[in-house]
Amino acid sequence: MGRSKMLNKQAGVSLSGLIGALAVIGVAGIFAMRMVPAYIEYNAIKSAIAKVKETGGTIREMQQAFNRHTSINDVEAVRGQDLVFSRDGDEVQISFAYEKRLPLMGNVSLLIDFAGTTDPSGMVAEADSVAR
C-alpha cells in the first residue's frame, strides 16, 4: 500500500514554473548585458586617473595623458576636460562624476551615477574646487 502511494506522487518542475524561471533569468541577462560594459568603462576611467596621477605634470598635461589612456580603451563618458583637479596639500587629487543612461527596452532606461577619485579619503571634489 505504501508503494502505490509513492508511485502516484509526481515530482519535478511544472511548465509554468519553468517559464517563470526562464523569464527571470532572461530579465537578469538583459540587465547584465547592458550594465557590464558601463562598469568596464568606469573601471577604465578609474585606472586612467590613477596612472595619470602617478605620472604627474601640469593639469593640462594630465588632461592630455588621460585622453590618451581613455582613447585606447574607447572611453567616451569622460574626457580630460571633465576631470576635477583639487589640491590636498602639495598633492593634486583627480575626481570625476558622470551619469550613464542605459536603455533597457522601449521607453524604460536604467540611470547609473558613477563617481571616482584618487583622494584617499574617497571624497569626490566638486567642479568649483578646481586647482589652479
Image (cartoon, helix red, strand yellow):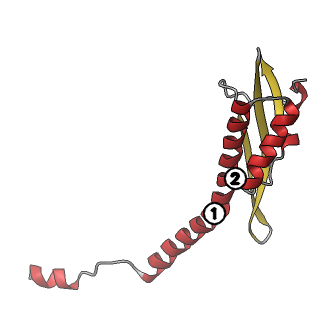
Task: Report the quarter where the N terminus lies.
Answer: bottom left
Amino acid type of the residue tagged 2 in the rendering? Glu
Q: Mark number for residue 71?
A: none
Residue at 85% x, 31% y: name it: 59
Of circles 2 and 1, which is in front?
Answer: 2
Q: Quadrant of residue 93?
A: top right
Q: Position of residue 101 (x, y in %)?
A: 78, 57
Q: Is residue 84 left or right of residue 54?
A: right
Residue 7 or 92: which is nearer the viewer? 92
Q: Considering the numbered disc 2 on the image, is that residue within a helix, a strand or a loop?
A: helix
Residue 115 or 51: which is nearer the viewer? 51
38 to 90, vertically: above or below: below
Q: Position of residue 12 (x, y in %)?
A: 32, 78
Q: Mark number for residue 31?
A: 1
Q: Position of residue 112 (x, y in %)?
A: 73, 50
Mark 2–mark 1 Cα distance, whole angstroms, equals 16 Å
Evaluate whether residue 83 shows in this view. no
Amino acid type of the residue tagged 1 in the rendering? Phe
Q: Position of residue 58 (x, y in %)?
A: 85, 29
On the image, numbered disc 2 is attached to which residue? 41
Residue at 73% x, 54% y: name it: 72
Disc 2 and disc 1 in contact, CB within 8 angstroms: no
Residue at 71% x, 42% y: name it: 48
